[in-house]
Amino acid sequence: MRAAPWVCGPFLLLSLLALVLPARAAEPSVWGDTLAHPRNSLSFVFTGDIMQHDAQIRAAARADGRYDYRESFRLVAPYLRDADYAVGNLELTLGGEPYAGYPLFSAPDTLAHALKSAGFSVLSTANNHSCDRRAEGVLRTIRLLDSAQLLHTGTFNTEAGRTLRTPLMLQKQAGGLTVAFLSYTYGTNGIPARPPAVVNLLDTVRMARDIALARRRAEAVIVAVHWGVEYTHVPTRAQRAMADFLFRQGVSIIVGNHPHVIQPFEVRRDGKGRIRQLCVYALGNFVSAQRTFPRAGGMLLRLRLRRQGGGVVVEHPQYLLTYVQRPSENHARAFRVVPLVENERPPRGDTTHPARYYRHALRLLRRAPRGIAPLGDLPLRPLAPVR
């Protein structure tokens, strides 16, 4: 199947000048604000599930035995890099060979470095596939993420390590806004986390203690939750109850995943109408080999947390729809994450999978709470192609 022209059209390359400008230069970003980051705020980009099915592993394999994922993230990298922290859900292990996809995931080690290069800085590791390679897979994944200099939370090498690394603290500069990050999952597909490995489970007593500690140490708390029913677009009662519990505990941002399709937003406002708390129930698949068009797409959520009015407010929440092109669609020998920007919307009558996903997602999100908007008509600035 050929990809739609609006997905595969030509793109501008980053200029050489852009590569040498200071990282904090005040210039328009691909998200529509600026790259200037005042010390009283932090910007975040959140993605959905990062997966590696067998077809993805085969597509990344090279004749010399390496696995190359650079092309997978080339087009979406500018959006990840235009934030202080890009956060993803690592729904796999780096458990070593033999590499495998579903049902017991173990991805090549180079994936971690490709994610870092693309702009990811934080990964949530608590999910139903955390223990796919048993305790040693949990421990090896932690070692690989540390070696790639990726921050992470949700799984730990020991109980003492959990105590030491909970919560994960995020801060860009001395005196700047402090944010605590936590991660939990409903379960691990019946495979227990044997000691010394630890996986954070949805336990409201322990979560309440963690959040209380996080609020003492940080000005805002973000919680990643692996929950819900796969392939359903409507949050369950259990999801809504858990979100309400987290809001009552004082959590600012709730980022849900696991359904592999997108789910809606929920916000809580103060008396002046400002968003103080936000939940996205599911961001869909960031990268995977799942075939049906609702599962072949996801979205990025970008927002800024800012000190204001004696607390922290959520500013400029924007979402960007993304679609995973298969190698047969893009002739690039890669499962490639493609941003579906507003100014490249599909023409009427286009029935390709990306066009169907785009229209399907917009119908689901048309009732998004006031203040949450799709990315507008902005230029895309992808990195140079991989040679």
Image (tube, rainbow, N blue to C red):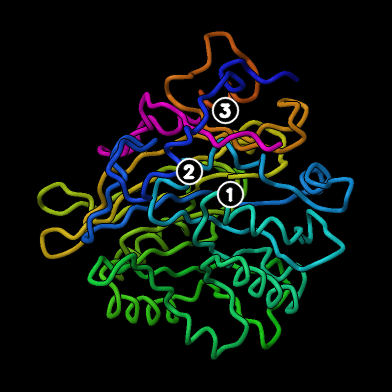
Front residue of 268/97: it is 97
CB within 8 Å, label 1 to label 2: yes
Q: How many marks?
A: 3
Give the x, y percent position of residue 1.
Answer: 75, 20
Would residue 204 be counted in the magenta stretch?
Answer: no
Dot 3 or dot 2, earlier in sequence: 2
Disc 3 and disc 1: Cα gap in Å?
Answer: 16 Å
Q: Residue 79's x, y, as percent?
A: 46, 41
Q: Disc 2 residue type?
A: Gln
Q: Position of residue 177 (x, y in %)?
A: 26, 65
User: For numbered disc 1, what is the local secondary structure?
Assistant: loop
Q: Nearer the viewer, residue 275 or 83?
A: 83
Distance from label 1 to label 2 (Cα)? Answer: 8 Å
Mark 2: give few (<14), some (14-19) or many (20+) Cα within 10 Å: many
Residue named by callout 2: 263
Mark 3 nearby-residue class (10 Å; few <14, some 14–19, many ≥20):
many
Residue lying at 48% horizontally and 55% vertically, measured from the top left: 256
Residue 176 quadrant: bottom left
Image quadrant where residue 32 sits = top left
The residue that appears at 72% across and 33% down in the rendered structure is 326
Q: In what element is the residue under mark 3?
A: helix
Residue at the image position 63 percent from the left and 38 percent from the top = 295
**Residue located beneath label 3 in the image:** 357
Which residues are drawn in magenta?
360-387
**Which residue is the site of mark 1?**
259
- 334 left or right of 372? right
